[in-house]
Amino acid sequence: MANPYFFSNERHKIDRPLVHQWLSEASYWAVGRPRSVQDAAIDASRNYGVWREDSGEQVAYARVVTDGVTFAWLCDVFVVPEVRGAGVGKMLMAGVISDLEPLGLRRTLLATADAHGLYEQYGFSELPVPSQFMARMRS
């Protein structure tokens, strides 16, 4: 049986209203994010998604902020609950890694509260020296 989903890194395919709804209403990290902020983030990032082959409906999203040479930050990874466990997250991550690999980035970071097992399959691990990393947070 053919895979019912497909991956793309084409920004124009992103369903911006849907992605904004997911992140601003259903994620634990971006609740309340304004649509204008999300659109600006999409425009300034590498974007990825997974869609249903039959309907073209988007079912997953991720973006990467990068200088394209040395560093990347994987963020806003979201898979709709109805398709979790069906390999969509793996398809998304495999596509992201495949797109970034030719850049030869020294470091790609991410933050997750609940998907460590998924990311470990793609080479992510805990920070070797967490005390070397700091964050500047705005309230």
Image (cartoon, grey):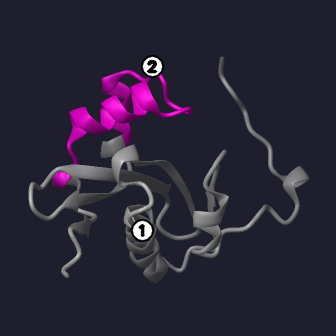
The foreground one among 48 and 139 is 48
Left or right: 12, with 41 as reference point: left
Which residues lie in the magenta part? 13-41
Mark 1: amino acid: Val
Residue 80 visible to the viewer: no
In the image, residue 56 sits, relative to residue 122, either above or below, namely: above
Relative image position of residue 105 (x, y in whole percent):
56, 74
Mark 2: amino acid: Gly
Farthest residue to the left: give it: 55
Q: Which residue is mark 1?
A: 96
Does the segment drawn in magenta span residue 14?
A: yes
Quarter of the picture holding the N terminus: bottom left
Residue 122 visible to the viewer: yes
The foreground one among 113 and 71 is 113
In the image, residue 111 sits, relative to residue 20, either above or below, namely: below
Which disc is residue 32 wearing? Answer: 2
